[in-house]
Structures are given as structure tokens and as C-alpha cells.
Amino acid sequence: MLSGDDQRSRAFAKPAFSEAQACALVESVFGFKVSKIRPLPSYDDQNFHICISRAKDNADGPTEYVLKINNTESSKTPDLIEVQSCIIMFLRAAGFPTASVCRTKGDNITSLVSVDSGSEIKSYLVRLLTYLPGRPIAEVPMGPQLLFEIGRLAAKLDKTLEKFHHPRLSSLHREDFIWNLKNVPLLEKYLHALGQNRNREIVEQVIQRYRDEVMTKLSQFRECINHGDLNDHNILIEPSASACGDATYRVSGVVDFDDMSYGYYVFEVAITIMYMMVESKTPVQVGGHVLAGFESIVPLTPVERGALFLLVCSRFCQSLVMAAYSCQLHPENEEYLMITAKTGWKHLQQMFDMGQKAVEEIWFDTAKSYESGISM
């Protein structure tokens, strides 16, 4: 994570390429002529959906891509971005619906582009990934089976990455990365963005309980590489007819690997539960279905299960506090930044009001019902 001063500088670190500049970038770095382009929402980088024109003698291959332009701060960590890109390719080879990474004209997977902003030269790492079909799961009602499949996907992803090797893998040890659930106490630096209110009181209580009840148990959790951001906009789905002819959905894409870092299996399931709760009309019930799917691949230990409630609350706090803070830096991006906040504070307060024991009982009973083949 960046220091306080560096965090403030992020207001100036986010790329601001025009569509014309992005088209020129694709042509100069990747050798493709762009026929259509549109911006995509992004937290602190810049993304474009592009369509390319292919010559008649080279009609094979994809025609839709995502151009990713990293902000100036993350562009200073090329090893990390290379590892993340290699993981995307590794997972695709293992059968996961991840993008393909397009190589540059110089046969690299990233390119560092320098731009003269007038007062200084700014450098941005750029990549080109194939565009994945489907729509975000945020746009469809999520039933128990889809939630189970998403939990299962999260566990399979982390489990598969046990076999991933790279000479720069240590770059995923992101010690002060604000989005790693190891670093919940670092949120205290940003609480001023909330003002003095009930929301802030809840966050302060979560942070204190995290210190007392989670930090003391981290050494007992099983370590792994986490995707770290399996939210309802980073998982894409497509309709899929079931055996009985009913309309169901299948996962068609997993995107946005920028928050990858070393963490623990229980972190991944906690993050996934939290984000699946965001759009749900029955948010507390969500956790049991996701947990059942996850545990069908990676059963949690009693210690990990005991930390799950607080970890889900902690992820709500990370998302909500950093959204409020980032809105102060990027008010023009408020609609995207505040997606979770629309329901997140209400869900967090509901969990807190119900209490850990009551929420766990719902989650664990639901997960247990899958063992007998009867999902609740």
C-alpha cells in the first residue's frame, strides 16, 4: 500500500488517456488497428473495450480486447504485474475462464509507455487481454446453486495456484497492501473519510475485534495465493440450459487479478461471501451457499470457520472505508466507487446487530444441508 502522501497523489496517478490516444497506443504497441472503442469502469486504473480490424489474410483470432492501463503507482511494480499476467495465462491453461494475454510487437506481455504531461514525464504499464463474454453476476438474481458454484470456483482457483511457480512469485507478498485482509488495522488511517457517525463506530469495533480475535490466529490459517477480489462485477456469467430445460447460468469469465496477493484460504471465501451479499435481498443467507461450494473443494478448519464472521465484516469495512476515501480523491468516479456502499452499510449493520453466533448458525446449517444433498 502507499503511504498517506502517496495515497493523496493517486488523484493525479490515475491514467487519463483519451479514446484517440488509446487507439494510437494499441496500434503502436500491439500492432492492431482499432475499429471501435469504449471506456470501461475502473477503480484507479483505466480500461477500454476495443474491437480491432483484421486483414482478410489474417482473419483468425479474437477481435475484441480489453486495454488495461495501470496507474503510475502500480506501474512502478512491473514484477508484480508480470506475475499476475502469468497467473491469468496459467489458469486459462488449467481450464478456468480467464482472458488470454496478447503479446506486444516486441513479444512481451507488458509495455511501459511514457507520456509527457507538460510538467513531468509519467510512465504507465499497458497490457492487452482478450475480452471475455458474459454479463456481471450483479445483473442477475443469484440462487443457491449459482452461489454454490461461485464458492466452488473460488476454492478451485486458490487450490490450482498451489502448483503455480514463477521466479518473481515473492512479489505477491504485498506487506502493506490495503486490500489484503491481513492489513485491516491499516484502515484507521482513512477513517476520517467517514466523519463521526454510527458507521465509523462499527468499523472501529470491527478493527478492534480483528486485532483481538483474528490477528492472534493468522499463524493457524492455511496460506495460499488469493485472487482477492471475486466481487459481483469480476465474475461473468452466460445462460446455460440445465438438464431439465430450466434456464440456469454458468461462469463465463473471471476478471481483474490486480488485487492478487499471498493470503489464506479463509480470506478468499470471506471476500467472496461479502461480495455475493452486496446485491442480495436475503444477504445473511448467502454465506452458507458460498461456504458449501468452497468447502466441497477446501473444507475449512475449526479455527478458520471461527474467524469467518469477522473476516466478512472486515472486508465490508475495507470496501466501504476505501470507497469513501477514494470518492474524496476521484469525485468524478463516485458512481463506480460507491457500488458496494449502496447496500453495504446496511448489510454490515445487520450482521453486527444479529451477532456472530446467530449469523454463523445460519451459514453453518445451510452448508451442512448440502452434505445430505438438501440445500436450504
Image: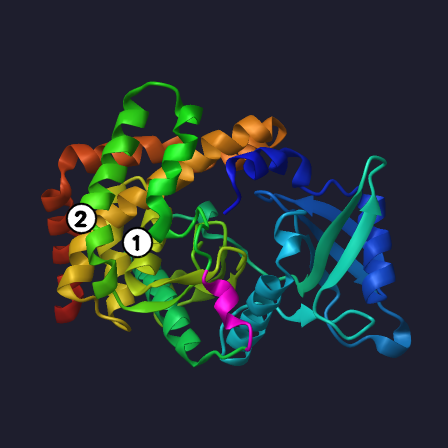
- The quarter of the displayed image where residue 329 is located: top right
Secondary element at image label 2: helix
Amino acid residing under circle 2:
Glu
Q: Would you name the residue on which mark 1 appears?
A: 270
Q: Is residue 359 above or below residue 324?
A: below
- Residue 335 on the magenta span: no
Secondary element at image label 1: helix
Of badges 1 and 2, nearer the viewer stands 2
- The quarter of the displayed image where residue 156 is located: bottom left
Amino acid residing under circle 1:
Ala
Q: How is the image coloured?
A: rainbow
From the top left corner, tell me how far across and down residue 264 is, in percent: 32, 63
Q: Where residue 213 is drawn, which disc sits there? A: 2
From the top left corner, tell me how far across and down residue 269 is, in percent: 31, 58
Quarter of the image with the C terminus is bottom left
**Image-based side of 97 in relation to 321, left or right:** right
> Gap between marks 1 and 2, in whole Å?
15 Å
From the top left corner, tell me how far across and down residue 207 is, in percent: 27, 39
Q: Is residue 57 above or below residue 48?
A: below
From the top left corner, tell me how far across and down residue 128 is, in percent: 71, 62
Q: Which residues fall within the magenta stretch?
A: 167-173
Mark 1 crowdedness (10 Å alpha carbons): few <14, some 14-19, many ≥20? many
**Which residue is located at x 28 percent, y 60 percent?**
266
**Which residue is located at x 45 percent, y 52 percent?**
137
**Image-based side of 107 in relation to 253, left or right:** right
Q: Nearer the viewer, residue 127 or 275?
A: 127
Q: Nearer the viewer, residue 39 or 13?
A: 13
Among the two numbered marks 1 and 2 on one chain, the one whose residue lies closer to the N terminus: 2
| Residue 373 in sight here | no
**Which residue is located at x 29 percent, y 65 percent?**
294
